[in-house]
Image: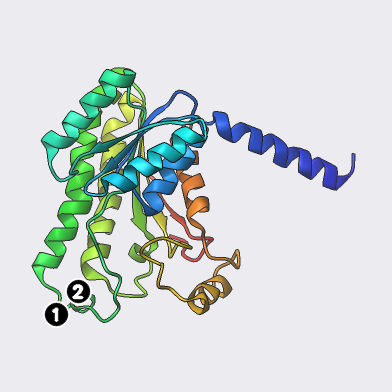
């Protein structure tokens, strides 16, 4: 067998594993009506998971994601819930248990509306307001805490579960000082480690994935090719991280392949940052 044939066989084998990676797992992806959350939901469903596509306001977009998943043979349904309201996410968890009897995976992806504007008031300590911080803390940290509290009774009863918090590599290298956003995302690191420490005895693994500037999401839609090219030249892999590649990292952490990993904060940015 030639080296090229061996390599191709390995690739074919790895591709055949993906559709069964999350077979029969039940997952919640918050903020999944568009962008990264939608991609995570779609790739989880393609890997065999039953996915709850959580959304806040974008009902039509969420239903489109669900329709796309079903059209390609996957299983999903949309559910409107504000992650900052504990009763709403508890009701969502209860509905999932009624439908499918379990909750295996939680991806805390939802965040408040945010404009990545380097000249905005929240990029300077002299002009940022506490209201900027509180909005991001509520949407990112309170939302994650509420979701964990909503799914925890079921995961404890199962004695197994995966919780994946989505952060940003700006917490390691604040190339733009988005004080409010980065501070809230940094808080998820502490939350992740505390949860992992407390919940490990119940078989619940908790990890954090920190993305860089992804090519391409709503947040990076105005980013020029020149900027992406610059990122590529300063990254060890010499390429910007795609949304699909980041979503694949979520699949890894959600699957049984990562059962020995918990409490970790991992940058998914091609090695641009090495925390």
**Residue 172 appears at what percent x and percent y?**
37, 64
According to the picture, the residue beneath numbered tag 2 turns out to be 122
Give SS at disc 1.
loop
Q: Is residue 168 above or below residue 61?
A: below
Q: How is the image coloured?
A: rainbow
* The label number, if any, that marks residue 247 in the structure image: none
Instruction: Say which of 200 and 99 sits in front.
Output: 99
Q: Quadrant of the N terminus?
A: top right
Observer able to see residue 145: yes
Left or right position of 131 against 66 = left
Q: Quadrant of the C terminus?
A: bottom left
Observer able to see residue 156: no
Seen at 34% across and 40% down, the residue is: 63
Instruction: Say which of 207 and 79 sits in front.
Output: 79
N-term mark: 2 or 1: 2
**Residue 259 appears at what percent x and percent y?**
46, 32
Left or right position of 241 against 209 = right
Q: Estimate the spatial distance between the alpha carbons at disc 2 and disc 1, rounded to whole Å.
A: 6 Å
Residue 30: which quarter of the image?
top left
Give SS at disc 2.
helix
**Residue 14 appears at what percent x and percent y?**
66, 37
Q: Is residue 25 above or below residue 216?
A: above
**Residue 271 appears at what percent x and percent y?**
52, 62
Seen at 46% across and 64% down, the residue is: 273
Q: Is the Cβ of the residue at disc 2 closer than 8 Å to that at disc 1?
A: yes
Toward the right, the furthest residue is 1
Left or right position of 94 against 242 = left
* The label number, if any, that marks residue 127 in the structure image: 1
């Amino acid at each position: 067998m030639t080296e090229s044939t061996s390599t191709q066989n390995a690739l074919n084998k790895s591709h055949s594993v993906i559709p069964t990676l999350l077979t029969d797992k039940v997952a919640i992806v918050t903020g999944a009506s568009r962008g990264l959350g939608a991609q995570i939901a779609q790739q989880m469903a393609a890997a065999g998971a039953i996915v709850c596509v959580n959304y806040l306001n974008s009902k039509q977009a969420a239903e489109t994601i669900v329709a796309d998943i079903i059209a390609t043979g996957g299983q999903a349904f949309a559910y409107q819930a504000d992650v900052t309201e504990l009763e709403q996410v508890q009701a969502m968890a209860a509905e999932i248990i009624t439908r499918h009897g379990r909750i295996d995976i939680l991806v805390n992806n939802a965040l408040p509306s945010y404009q990545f504007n380097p000249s905005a008031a929240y990029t300077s300590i002299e002009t940022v307001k506490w209201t900027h911080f509180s909005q991001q803390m509520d949407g990112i940290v309170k939302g994650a805490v509420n979701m964990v509290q909503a799914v925890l009774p079921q995961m404890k009863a199962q004695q197994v579960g995966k919780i994946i918090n989505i952060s940003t590599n700006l917490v390691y290298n604040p190339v733009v000082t988005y004080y409010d956003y980065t501070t809230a995302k940094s808080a998820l690191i502490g939350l992740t480690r505390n949860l992992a420490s407390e919940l490990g005895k119940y078989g619940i693994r908790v990890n954090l994935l920190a993305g860089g500037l992804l090519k391409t999401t709503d947040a990076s839609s105005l980013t020029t090719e020149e900027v992406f090219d610059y990122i590529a030249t300063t990254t060890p892999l010499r390429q910007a991280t795609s949304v699909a590649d980041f979503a694949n990292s979520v699949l890894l952490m959600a699957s049984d392949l990562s059962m020995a990993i918990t409490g970790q904060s991992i940058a998914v940015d091609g090695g641009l940052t090495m925390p």
